């Protein structure tokens, strides 16, 4: 009985470990591209200010995995010229799934980066934080 229980425990632990690694691997198979939204003086391509005065970064994510993905979540960071973090934001794709090689729009809105602070942004990052396999 103990041998059977140990065997089952080892099998379950291996499966959980495999699923965790697979989920992490899927995140790495999503490509983030920043899109041009037109020329905004002093701003990098893909950055704009909405009517509410918040900084946005517009782009897309592309599923390079061989399986459909659920909603992909990205995280954005905005930095000043001194490297100081000025704001963070997250965004999840709207579509319930993204097929292999398909792209989905992202629009990361920094609610805390407004007014004069927008001109201080000199560098930004957008990274994938979640890319679950579609069930």
Image (spheres, grey):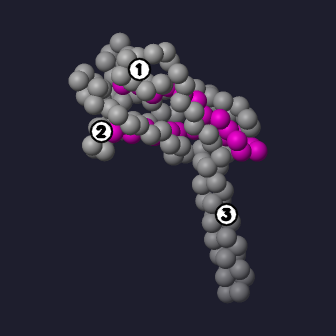
Dot label at residue 6 = none
* Residue 65, position as x, y percentages in the image: 71, 45
Residue at 57% across, 37% down: 32
Q: Which residue is mark 1?
A: 48
- Look at the image and tell me in which quarter the N terminus lies: bottom right
Asked whether the viewer can see residue 132, the reply is: no
> Which numbered disc flags the more N-terminal residue, 1 or 2?
1
Furthest residue toward bottom? 2
Q: Please give the range of residues in magenta.
A: 55-79
Q: Give the secondary structure at mark 2.
A: loop
> Which numbered disc flags the more N-terminal residue, 1 or 3?
3
Answer with the quarter of the image where residue 87 lies: top left
Q: Compared with residue 133, is residue 50 higher up or lower down, i.e. above or below?
A: above
Discs 3/2, front: 2
> Which numbered disc flags the more N-terminal residue, 3 or 2?
3
Q: Depth check: 27 or 42 in front?
A: 42
Q: CA distance from mark 1 to mark 2?
A: 18 Å
Q: Residues within 10 Å of mark 3 (few under 14, many from 20)?
A: few
Q: Which residue is mark 3?
A: 18
Residue at 29% across, 26% down: 119
Dot label at residue 81 = 2
Asked whether the viewer can see residue 38, the reply is: yes
């Amino acid at each position: 009985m103990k041998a059977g229980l140990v065997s089952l425990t080892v099998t379950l632990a291996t499966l959980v470990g495999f699923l965790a690694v697979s989920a992490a691997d899927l995140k790495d198979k999503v490509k983030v591209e920043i899109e041009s939204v037109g020329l905004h003086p002093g701003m990098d391509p893909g950055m704009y200010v909405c009517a509410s005065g918040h900084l946005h970064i517009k782009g897309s994510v592309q599923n390079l995995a061989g399986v459909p993905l659920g909603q992909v979540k990205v995280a954005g960071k905005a930095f000043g010229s001194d490297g100081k973090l000025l704001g963070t934001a997250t965004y999840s794709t709207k579509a319930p799934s993204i097929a292999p090689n398909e792209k989905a729009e992202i629009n990361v809105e920094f609610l805390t980066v407004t007014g004069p602070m927008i001109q201080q942004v000199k560098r930004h990052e957008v990274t994938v934080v979640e890319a679950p396999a579609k069930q």
